[in-house]
Amino acid sequence: MFDIFKSMFKEEWRMHSSLFGNKGFSLFPVFIFLFTFFVSLVLPIFREIFTYAQIALGMHYLFLLLGSTVGAFGLMGREFMNRRFGQASLIAYSSRTLPVSERLIFANFLIKDVIYYFVLYVLPFIAGFALATTLIPAGDFHFPFALLLLTLSLSFMIGLSLVFFLSTIYAHSGKLLTSGLLAGLVFLLIISGNLDSGIFYTLPSLSFFLLPSKSRFLFSSGLIIIPSTLSLLFLKVDFPQAKKSFSNSFSRLCKEFGSYRYAAFVAKDFLDLKRSEGGLGKLIFSVLLPAALIWMLLSALGRVLPALNTLILFALVLGVLSSSMYNWLTEYDIFASYACFPLKVSDMIRSKLNTHLFLNLVPLILLILLTIKTDPAVLLPALLVFLSISLYIVSILVYLTGLSPSINLYNGRTFALYTLSVMPLLLVNVILSMFGLYYVLVNLLLVPPALYLLGQSFRKWDRIESQLF
Protein backbone atom coordinates (compact mmCIF):
# COMPACT_ATOMS: atom_id res chain seq x y z
CA MET A 1 0.00 0.00 0.00
CA PHE A 2 2.81 2.41 0.85
CA ASP A 3 4.42 1.83 -2.57
CA ILE A 4 1.20 2.95 -4.29
CA PHE A 5 0.95 6.00 -2.05
CA LYS A 6 4.60 6.93 -2.68
CA SER A 7 4.17 6.52 -6.45
CA MET A 8 1.04 8.68 -6.43
CA PHE A 9 2.86 11.37 -4.49
CA LYS A 10 5.69 11.41 -7.03
CA GLU A 11 3.15 11.38 -9.86
CA GLU A 12 1.40 14.47 -8.49
CA TRP A 13 4.66 16.40 -8.26
CA ARG A 14 5.91 15.30 -11.67
CA MET A 15 2.60 16.13 -13.34
CA HIS A 16 2.75 19.72 -12.07
CA SER A 17 6.50 20.26 -12.33
CA SER A 18 6.62 18.93 -15.90
CA LEU A 19 4.12 21.61 -16.90
CA PHE A 20 5.93 24.64 -15.50
CA GLY A 21 9.18 23.44 -13.88
CA ASN A 22 10.21 22.40 -10.40
CA LYS A 23 11.15 25.93 -9.33
CA GLY A 24 7.92 27.53 -10.56
CA PHE A 25 5.74 24.98 -8.78
CA SER A 26 7.78 24.96 -5.57
CA LEU A 27 7.34 28.75 -5.31
CA PHE A 28 3.56 28.35 -5.05
CA PRO A 29 3.44 27.53 -1.28
CA VAL A 30 6.13 30.18 -0.70
CA PHE A 31 3.84 32.79 -2.21
CA ILE A 32 0.87 31.61 -0.11
CA PHE A 33 3.08 31.99 2.98
CA LEU A 34 4.19 35.52 2.02
CA PHE A 35 0.71 36.63 0.97
CA THR A 36 -0.88 35.39 4.20
CA PHE A 37 1.91 37.00 6.21
CA PHE A 38 1.46 40.48 4.69
CA VAL A 39 -2.35 40.34 4.79
CA SER A 40 -2.24 39.26 8.44
CA LEU A 41 -0.11 42.29 9.32
CA VAL A 42 -3.22 44.46 8.91
CA LEU A 43 -5.10 42.35 11.45
CA PRO A 44 -5.32 45.27 13.95
CA ILE A 45 -7.49 47.15 11.42
CA PHE A 46 -9.91 44.21 11.29
CA ARG A 47 -10.45 44.47 15.05
CA GLU A 48 -12.62 47.53 14.46
CA ILE A 49 -14.76 45.70 11.88
CA PHE A 50 -14.79 41.97 12.59
CA THR A 51 -14.87 39.90 15.75
CA TYR A 52 -12.51 37.06 16.60
CA ALA A 53 -15.24 34.52 15.77
CA GLN A 54 -16.03 36.16 12.41
CA ILE A 55 -12.39 36.00 11.29
CA ALA A 56 -12.25 32.35 12.34
CA LEU A 57 -15.49 31.71 10.42
CA GLY A 58 -14.04 33.22 7.24
CA MET A 59 -10.88 31.11 7.44
CA HIS A 60 -12.69 27.81 8.08
CA TYR A 61 -15.21 28.29 5.26
CA LEU A 62 -12.37 29.29 2.93
CA PHE A 63 -10.65 25.96 3.58
CA LEU A 64 -13.95 24.10 3.28
CA LEU A 65 -14.34 25.51 -0.25
CA LEU A 66 -10.66 24.87 -0.98
CA GLY A 67 -11.03 21.20 -0.05
CA SER A 68 -14.07 20.93 -2.31
CA THR A 69 -12.13 22.45 -5.20
CA VAL A 70 -9.15 20.11 -4.73
CA GLY A 71 -11.46 17.10 -4.58
CA ALA A 72 -13.18 18.10 -7.81
CA PHE A 73 -9.83 18.62 -9.58
CA GLY A 74 -8.59 15.21 -8.49
CA LEU A 75 -11.72 13.49 -9.77
CA MET A 76 -11.34 15.12 -13.18
CA GLY A 77 -7.72 13.99 -13.37
CA ARG A 78 -8.28 11.11 -15.77
CA GLU A 79 -9.97 13.27 -18.40
CA PHE A 80 -7.42 16.04 -17.91
CA MET A 81 -4.51 13.63 -18.48
CA ASN A 82 -6.07 12.02 -21.53
CA ARG A 83 -6.92 15.34 -23.17
CA ARG A 84 -3.56 16.93 -22.41
CA PHE A 85 -1.21 13.96 -22.80
CA GLY A 86 -2.92 11.59 -25.21
CA GLN A 87 -3.38 8.14 -23.67
CA ALA A 88 -1.54 8.96 -20.44
CA SER A 89 -3.50 8.39 -17.25
CA LEU A 90 -3.21 8.61 -13.49
CA ILE A 91 -2.30 5.65 -11.30
CA ALA A 92 -5.73 6.02 -9.71
CA TYR A 93 -7.32 4.88 -12.97
CA SER A 94 -4.94 1.96 -13.61
CA SER A 95 -6.57 -0.75 -11.50
CA ARG A 96 -6.95 -3.04 -14.50
CA THR A 97 -3.18 -3.24 -14.90
CA LEU A 98 -2.28 -3.39 -11.19
CA PRO A 99 -2.82 -6.47 -8.96
CA VAL A 100 -4.71 -4.48 -6.34
CA SER A 101 -8.34 -3.53 -5.85
CA GLU A 102 -9.87 -0.27 -7.03
CA ARG A 103 -10.86 0.56 -3.45
CA LEU A 104 -7.27 0.29 -2.23
CA ILE A 105 -6.04 2.50 -5.06
CA PHE A 106 -8.66 5.20 -4.41
CA ALA A 107 -8.04 5.05 -0.64
CA ASN A 108 -4.39 5.88 -1.41
CA PHE A 109 -5.53 8.59 -3.82
CA LEU A 110 -7.66 10.23 -1.12
CA ILE A 111 -4.86 10.09 1.48
CA LYS A 112 -2.39 11.46 -1.06
CA ASP A 113 -4.64 14.43 -1.86
CA VAL A 114 -5.07 15.25 1.84
CA ILE A 115 -1.34 15.20 2.61
CA TYR A 116 -0.18 16.78 -0.64
CA TYR A 117 -2.48 19.79 -0.54
CA PHE A 118 -2.12 20.10 3.23
CA VAL A 119 1.58 20.82 2.59
CA LEU A 120 0.75 23.01 -0.41
CA TYR A 121 -2.01 25.16 1.15
CA VAL A 122 -2.72 24.66 4.84
CA LEU A 123 0.81 24.72 6.27
CA PRO A 124 1.97 27.84 4.35
CA PHE A 125 -1.24 29.66 5.34
CA ILE A 126 -0.84 28.88 9.05
CA ALA A 127 2.90 29.61 9.01
CA GLY A 128 2.37 33.05 7.42
CA PHE A 129 -0.49 33.86 9.79
CA ALA A 130 1.48 32.72 12.86
CA LEU A 131 4.59 34.72 11.93
CA ALA A 132 2.59 37.90 11.31
CA THR A 133 0.72 37.74 14.61
CA THR A 134 4.01 37.45 16.52
CA LEU A 135 4.96 40.88 15.14
CA ILE A 136 1.75 42.72 16.01
CA PRO A 137 -0.06 43.21 19.35
CA ALA A 138 -2.49 40.33 19.72
CA GLY A 139 -5.17 42.07 21.77
CA ASP A 140 -8.41 40.10 21.62
CA PHE A 141 -7.18 38.09 18.62
CA HIS A 142 -5.07 35.43 20.24
CA PHE A 143 -5.24 32.42 17.92
CA PRO A 144 -3.99 29.08 19.30
CA PHE A 145 -2.03 28.02 16.20
CA ALA A 146 -1.80 24.31 16.93
CA LEU A 147 -5.58 24.18 17.30
CA LEU A 148 -6.06 26.38 14.20
CA LEU A 149 -3.81 24.06 12.18
CA LEU A 150 -5.93 21.09 13.24
CA THR A 151 -9.34 22.70 12.63
CA LEU A 152 -8.43 24.24 9.25
CA SER A 153 -7.17 20.81 8.22
CA LEU A 154 -10.49 19.33 9.34
CA SER A 155 -12.39 21.92 7.27
CA PHE A 156 -10.23 21.12 4.26
CA MET A 157 -10.78 17.37 4.64
CA ILE A 158 -14.55 17.77 5.18
CA GLY A 159 -14.81 19.60 1.85
CA LEU A 160 -12.62 17.01 0.13
CA SER A 161 -14.50 13.99 1.48
CA LEU A 162 -17.93 15.47 0.69
CA VAL A 163 -16.93 16.02 -2.94
CA PHE A 164 -15.70 12.42 -3.17
CA PHE A 165 -19.04 11.28 -1.76
CA LEU A 166 -20.99 13.41 -4.24
CA SER A 167 -18.87 12.01 -7.05
CA THR A 168 -19.88 8.48 -6.00
CA ILE A 169 -23.54 9.46 -6.18
CA TYR A 170 -22.89 11.03 -9.59
CA ALA A 171 -21.25 7.81 -10.84
CA HIS A 172 -24.44 5.88 -9.98
CA SER A 173 -26.95 8.53 -11.05
CA GLY A 174 -25.77 11.82 -12.52
CA LYS A 175 -29.32 13.06 -13.10
CA LEU A 176 -30.28 12.39 -9.47
CA LEU A 177 -27.30 14.35 -8.15
CA THR A 178 -27.78 17.26 -10.56
CA SER A 179 -31.48 17.53 -9.73
CA GLY A 180 -30.76 17.33 -6.01
CA LEU A 181 -28.06 20.02 -6.17
CA LEU A 182 -30.28 22.37 -8.16
CA ALA A 183 -33.15 21.84 -5.73
CA GLY A 184 -30.79 22.47 -2.81
CA LEU A 185 -29.45 25.60 -4.50
CA VAL A 186 -32.93 27.05 -4.94
CA PHE A 187 -33.84 26.15 -1.35
CA LEU A 188 -30.71 27.84 0.05
CA LEU A 189 -31.39 31.01 -1.90
CA ILE A 190 -35.03 31.12 -0.73
CA ILE A 191 -34.23 30.68 2.96
CA SER A 192 -31.07 32.81 2.96
CA GLY A 193 -32.85 35.98 4.08
CA ASN A 194 -34.36 34.26 7.12
CA LEU A 195 -31.29 32.45 8.41
CA ASP A 196 -29.84 33.23 11.82
CA SER A 197 -26.13 34.10 11.51
CA GLY A 198 -25.41 31.64 14.34
CA ILE A 199 -26.16 28.69 12.06
CA PHE A 200 -22.87 29.21 10.21
CA TYR A 201 -20.95 28.61 13.40
CA THR A 202 -22.31 25.06 13.56
CA LEU A 203 -19.70 23.90 11.04
CA PRO A 204 -18.11 21.18 13.23
CA SER A 205 -14.49 22.16 12.62
CA LEU A 206 -15.27 25.84 13.37
CA SER A 207 -17.30 25.08 16.50
CA PHE A 208 -14.45 22.80 17.66
CA PHE A 209 -12.01 25.70 17.22
CA LEU A 210 -14.18 28.19 19.11
CA LEU A 211 -15.09 25.77 21.90
CA PRO A 212 -12.87 22.65 21.86
CA SER A 213 -14.45 19.43 23.07
CA LYS A 214 -14.06 15.74 22.37
CA SER A 215 -17.59 15.43 20.95
CA ARG A 216 -17.00 18.25 18.42
CA PHE A 217 -13.74 16.68 17.32
CA LEU A 218 -15.42 13.28 16.86
CA PHE A 219 -18.27 14.88 14.91
CA SER A 220 -15.79 16.65 12.61
CA SER A 221 -13.87 13.40 12.11
CA GLY A 222 -17.14 11.59 11.37
CA LEU A 223 -17.92 14.05 8.56
CA ILE A 224 -14.61 13.03 7.01
CA ILE A 225 -14.52 9.29 7.68
CA ILE A 226 -18.16 8.37 6.95
CA PRO A 227 -18.48 10.02 3.48
CA SER A 228 -15.02 8.77 2.49
CA THR A 229 -15.84 5.21 3.62
CA LEU A 230 -19.17 5.22 1.78
CA SER A 231 -17.41 6.53 -1.33
CA LEU A 232 -14.93 3.66 -1.23
CA LEU A 233 -17.57 1.01 -0.44
CA PHE A 234 -19.80 2.07 -3.33
CA LEU A 235 -16.98 3.04 -5.65
CA LYS A 236 -17.87 2.75 -9.31
CA VAL A 237 -15.20 2.99 -12.00
CA ASP A 238 -16.45 2.51 -15.56
CA PHE A 239 -14.24 0.82 -18.11
CA PRO A 240 -16.29 1.09 -21.31
CA GLN A 241 -15.77 -1.73 -23.80
CA ALA A 242 -16.61 0.44 -26.77
CA LYS A 243 -16.10 4.04 -27.73
CA LYS A 244 -18.78 6.49 -26.77
CA SER A 245 -21.01 7.61 -29.60
CA PHE A 246 -23.29 10.61 -29.89
CA SER A 247 -25.82 11.80 -32.41
CA ASN A 248 -24.72 14.65 -34.66
CA SER A 249 -25.67 17.80 -32.74
CA PHE A 250 -22.98 20.13 -34.02
CA SER A 251 -24.74 21.51 -37.11
CA ARG A 252 -28.00 22.10 -35.26
CA LEU A 253 -26.20 23.86 -32.40
CA CYS A 254 -24.24 26.05 -34.83
CA LYS A 255 -27.50 27.25 -36.36
CA GLU A 256 -28.87 28.14 -32.93
CA PHE A 257 -25.82 30.31 -32.22
CA GLY A 258 -26.20 32.09 -35.54
CA SER A 259 -23.73 32.78 -38.33
CA TYR A 260 -21.20 35.01 -36.58
CA ARG A 261 -17.49 34.20 -36.74
CA TYR A 262 -17.10 32.08 -33.60
CA ALA A 263 -20.41 30.21 -33.68
CA ALA A 264 -18.77 26.89 -34.58
CA PHE A 265 -16.22 27.22 -31.76
CA VAL A 266 -18.88 28.08 -29.19
CA ALA A 267 -20.99 25.12 -30.34
CA LYS A 268 -17.99 22.81 -29.95
CA ASP A 269 -17.27 24.18 -26.46
CA PHE A 270 -20.85 23.50 -25.37
CA LEU A 271 -20.73 19.97 -26.76
CA ASP A 272 -17.38 19.35 -25.05
CA LEU A 273 -18.79 20.65 -21.80
CA LYS A 274 -21.92 18.52 -22.07
CA ARG A 275 -20.04 15.32 -22.90
CA SER A 276 -17.06 15.71 -20.56
CA GLU A 277 -16.94 14.21 -17.07
CA GLY A 278 -19.19 16.27 -14.85
CA GLY A 279 -20.84 17.91 -17.85
CA LEU A 280 -22.92 20.95 -17.05
CA GLY A 281 -22.57 19.97 -13.39
CA LYS A 282 -19.28 21.91 -13.48
CA LEU A 283 -21.35 25.09 -13.64
CA ILE A 284 -23.21 24.04 -10.50
CA PHE A 285 -20.10 22.96 -8.57
CA SER A 286 -17.78 25.81 -9.53
CA VAL A 287 -20.20 28.77 -9.62
CA LEU A 288 -23.75 28.24 -8.40
CA LEU A 289 -23.21 26.25 -5.19
CA PRO A 290 -20.27 28.40 -3.99
CA ALA A 291 -22.36 31.48 -4.89
CA ALA A 292 -25.29 30.19 -2.83
CA LEU A 293 -23.05 29.51 0.18
CA ILE A 294 -21.38 32.92 -0.10
CA TRP A 295 -24.76 34.66 -0.41
CA MET A 296 -25.90 32.97 2.79
CA LEU A 297 -22.71 34.04 4.60
CA LEU A 298 -22.98 37.61 3.33
CA SER A 299 -26.67 37.80 4.25
CA ALA A 300 -25.81 36.87 7.83
CA LEU A 301 -22.80 39.20 7.86
CA GLY A 302 -24.89 42.10 6.55
CA ARG A 303 -27.09 42.03 9.65
CA VAL A 304 -24.02 42.26 11.88
CA LEU A 305 -22.21 44.88 9.78
CA PRO A 306 -24.88 47.07 8.13
CA ALA A 307 -22.20 49.36 6.64
CA LEU A 308 -21.35 46.58 4.17
CA ASN A 309 -23.77 46.37 1.26
CA THR A 310 -24.51 42.66 0.87
CA LEU A 311 -25.59 42.81 -2.77
CA ILE A 312 -22.53 44.80 -3.88
CA LEU A 313 -20.22 42.38 -2.09
CA PHE A 314 -22.07 39.43 -3.62
CA ALA A 315 -21.74 40.97 -7.11
CA LEU A 316 -18.03 41.38 -6.43
CA VAL A 317 -17.59 37.74 -5.38
CA LEU A 318 -19.81 36.52 -8.22
CA GLY A 319 -17.56 38.37 -10.69
CA VAL A 320 -14.56 36.48 -9.32
CA LEU A 321 -16.42 33.13 -9.43
CA SER A 322 -17.66 33.69 -12.99
CA SER A 323 -14.11 34.32 -14.18
CA SER A 324 -13.26 30.77 -13.04
CA MET A 325 -15.44 29.45 -15.87
CA TYR A 326 -12.69 30.48 -18.29
CA ASN A 327 -10.39 28.06 -16.42
CA TRP A 328 -12.41 24.95 -17.10
CA LEU A 329 -13.45 26.04 -20.59
CA THR A 330 -9.78 25.87 -21.54
CA GLU A 331 -8.86 22.97 -19.26
CA TYR A 332 -9.13 20.17 -21.81
CA ASP A 333 -8.41 22.02 -25.06
CA ILE A 334 -4.92 22.66 -26.46
CA PHE A 335 -3.97 24.69 -29.52
CA ALA A 336 -2.03 21.77 -31.04
CA SER A 337 -5.39 20.17 -31.90
CA TYR A 338 -6.10 23.11 -34.23
CA ALA A 339 -2.61 23.62 -35.64
CA CYS A 340 -3.64 22.14 -39.02
CA PHE A 341 -6.26 24.87 -39.49
CA PRO A 342 -5.61 28.47 -40.58
CA LEU A 343 -6.04 29.71 -37.03
CA LYS A 344 -3.96 31.63 -34.52
CA VAL A 345 -3.86 31.29 -30.76
CA SER A 346 -5.73 34.60 -30.52
CA ASP A 347 -8.60 33.05 -32.51
CA MET A 348 -8.84 30.25 -29.95
CA ILE A 349 -8.73 32.69 -27.05
CA ARG A 350 -11.46 34.83 -28.62
CA SER A 351 -13.64 31.75 -29.11
CA LYS A 352 -13.23 30.77 -25.44
CA LEU A 353 -14.12 34.31 -24.40
CA ASN A 354 -17.25 34.09 -26.55
CA THR A 355 -18.28 30.87 -24.80
CA HIS A 356 -17.47 32.45 -21.44
CA LEU A 357 -19.77 35.34 -22.37
CA PHE A 358 -22.67 32.96 -23.03
CA LEU A 359 -22.09 31.06 -19.76
CA ASN A 360 -21.82 34.34 -17.87
CA LEU A 361 -25.54 34.79 -18.45
CA VAL A 362 -26.18 32.20 -15.70
CA PRO A 363 -24.56 34.14 -12.80
CA LEU A 364 -25.87 37.37 -14.33
CA ILE A 365 -29.47 36.12 -14.19
CA LEU A 366 -28.87 34.85 -10.63
CA LEU A 367 -27.65 38.30 -9.58
CA ILE A 368 -30.59 40.07 -11.25
CA LEU A 369 -33.16 37.79 -9.57
CA LEU A 370 -31.57 38.14 -6.13
CA THR A 371 -31.29 41.93 -6.47
CA ILE A 372 -34.91 42.35 -7.60
CA LYS A 373 -36.06 40.14 -4.73
CA THR A 374 -33.90 41.86 -2.11
CA ASP A 375 -33.35 45.53 -3.07
CA PRO A 376 -34.14 46.66 -6.65
CA ALA A 377 -32.47 50.04 -6.04
CA VAL A 378 -29.07 48.32 -6.02
CA LEU A 379 -29.57 46.63 -9.41
CA LEU A 380 -27.58 49.07 -11.57
CA PRO A 381 -24.51 49.34 -9.27
CA ALA A 382 -24.50 45.57 -8.66
CA LEU A 383 -24.59 44.81 -12.39
CA LEU A 384 -21.81 47.32 -13.01
CA VAL A 385 -19.60 45.72 -10.35
CA PHE A 386 -20.24 42.20 -11.62
CA LEU A 387 -19.62 42.94 -15.30
CA SER A 388 -16.55 45.15 -14.80
CA ILE A 389 -14.88 42.82 -12.28
CA SER A 390 -15.58 39.74 -14.38
CA LEU A 391 -14.17 41.42 -17.53
CA TYR A 392 -11.09 42.72 -15.71
CA ILE A 393 -10.22 39.41 -14.04
CA VAL A 394 -10.68 37.44 -17.27
CA SER A 395 -8.39 39.90 -19.06
CA ILE A 396 -5.74 39.35 -16.37
CA LEU A 397 -6.16 35.57 -16.69
CA VAL A 398 -5.82 35.67 -20.47
CA TYR A 399 -2.76 37.91 -20.38
CA LEU A 400 -0.92 35.84 -17.77
CA THR A 401 -1.97 32.31 -18.72
CA GLY A 402 -3.34 32.27 -22.29
CA LEU A 403 -5.15 29.01 -22.98
CA SER A 404 -3.81 27.27 -19.84
CA PRO A 405 -5.04 29.12 -16.72
CA SER A 406 -5.67 25.95 -14.68
CA ILE A 407 -2.05 24.95 -15.22
CA ASN A 408 -0.15 28.22 -15.24
CA LEU A 409 -1.74 29.60 -12.08
CA TYR A 410 0.13 26.93 -10.10
CA ASN A 411 3.34 28.68 -11.11
CA GLY A 412 4.37 30.71 -8.07
CA ARG A 413 5.43 33.80 -10.05
CA THR A 414 2.29 33.83 -12.22
CA PHE A 415 0.01 33.34 -9.22
CA ALA A 416 1.75 36.19 -7.42
CA LEU A 417 1.21 38.55 -10.38
CA TYR A 418 -2.44 37.47 -10.64
CA THR A 419 -3.10 38.02 -6.93
CA LEU A 420 -1.37 41.40 -6.86
CA SER A 421 -3.42 42.47 -9.88
CA VAL A 422 -6.75 41.41 -8.37
CA MET A 423 -6.68 41.58 -4.56
CA PRO A 424 -6.07 45.36 -4.16
CA LEU A 425 -8.97 46.03 -6.53
CA LEU A 426 -11.31 43.79 -4.53
CA LEU A 427 -10.27 45.49 -1.29
CA VAL A 428 -10.88 48.96 -2.78
CA ASN A 429 -14.36 47.89 -3.87
CA VAL A 430 -15.21 46.61 -0.38
CA ILE A 431 -14.14 49.95 1.10
CA LEU A 432 -16.00 52.00 -1.53
CA SER A 433 -19.21 50.04 -0.93
CA MET A 434 -19.21 51.33 2.67
CA PHE A 435 -19.41 54.95 1.50
CA GLY A 436 -22.40 54.52 -0.79
CA LEU A 437 -23.75 52.61 -3.76
CA TYR A 438 -22.62 54.90 -6.53
CA TYR A 439 -19.00 55.08 -5.44
CA VAL A 440 -18.64 51.72 -7.19
CA LEU A 441 -19.20 53.52 -10.52
CA VAL A 442 -15.45 54.02 -10.40
CA ASN A 443 -15.28 50.45 -11.75
CA LEU A 444 -16.15 51.87 -15.16
CA LEU A 445 -12.49 52.90 -15.25
CA LEU A 446 -11.57 49.19 -15.41
CA VAL A 447 -13.15 48.68 -18.84
CA PRO A 448 -10.54 50.51 -21.01
CA PRO A 449 -7.48 48.84 -19.39
CA ALA A 450 -9.23 45.44 -19.52
CA LEU A 451 -9.91 45.81 -23.27
CA TYR A 452 -6.37 47.07 -23.86
CA LEU A 453 -4.96 44.12 -21.91
CA LEU A 454 -6.99 41.68 -24.02
CA GLY A 455 -5.59 43.23 -27.19
CA GLN A 456 -2.07 42.90 -25.79
CA SER A 457 -2.82 39.31 -24.80
CA PHE A 458 -3.81 38.32 -28.34
CA ARG A 459 -0.55 39.73 -29.71
CA LYS A 460 1.51 38.22 -26.89
CA TRP A 461 0.27 34.63 -27.30
CA ASP A 462 0.38 34.79 -31.11
CA ARG A 463 4.01 35.89 -30.84
CA ILE A 464 4.86 33.10 -28.40
CA GLU A 465 3.21 30.50 -30.62
CA SER A 466 5.05 31.75 -33.71
CA GLN A 467 8.36 31.41 -31.86
CA LEU A 468 7.59 27.78 -31.04
CA PHE A 469 7.22 26.92 -34.71
Image (cartoon, rainbow, N blue to C red):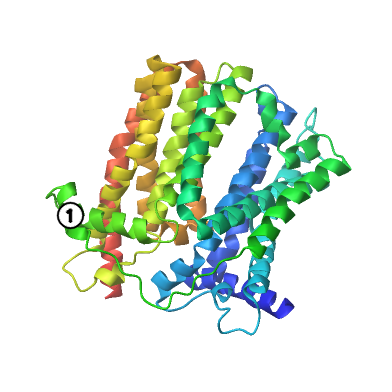
Residue at 11% across, 50% down: 259
Task: Find disc 1 in the rendering and name its residue.
Answer: 252
- Type of amino acid at the residue the image marks with label 1: Arg
Residue 418 in view here? no
**54 or 34: nearer the eye?**
54
Dot 1: element: helix
Q: Is residue 400 left or right of residue 341?
A: right
Q: Is residue 220 left or right of residue 296?
A: right
Q: Position of residue 148 (x, y in %)?
A: 77, 44
Q: State the residue in front, 446 or 246.
A: 246
- In the image, residue 310 sits, relative to residue 350, either above or below, namely above
Q: Residues within 10 Å of mark 1 (few under 14, many from 20)?
A: few
Q: Is residue 193 above or below residue 424?
A: above
Which residue sits furthest right? Answer: 214
Q: Nearer the viewer, residue 397 or 351?
A: 351
Q: Position of residue 110 (x, y in %)?
A: 65, 64
- Above or below residue 445? Residue 258 is below
Task: Please indicate, yes or no, whether residue 107 appears anywhere in the rendered image.
Answer: yes
Q: Quadrant of the N terminus?
A: bottom right
Q: Position of residue 96 (x, y in %)?
A: 55, 81
Q: What residue is shown at x 43% (from left), y 25% (from top)?
A: 370
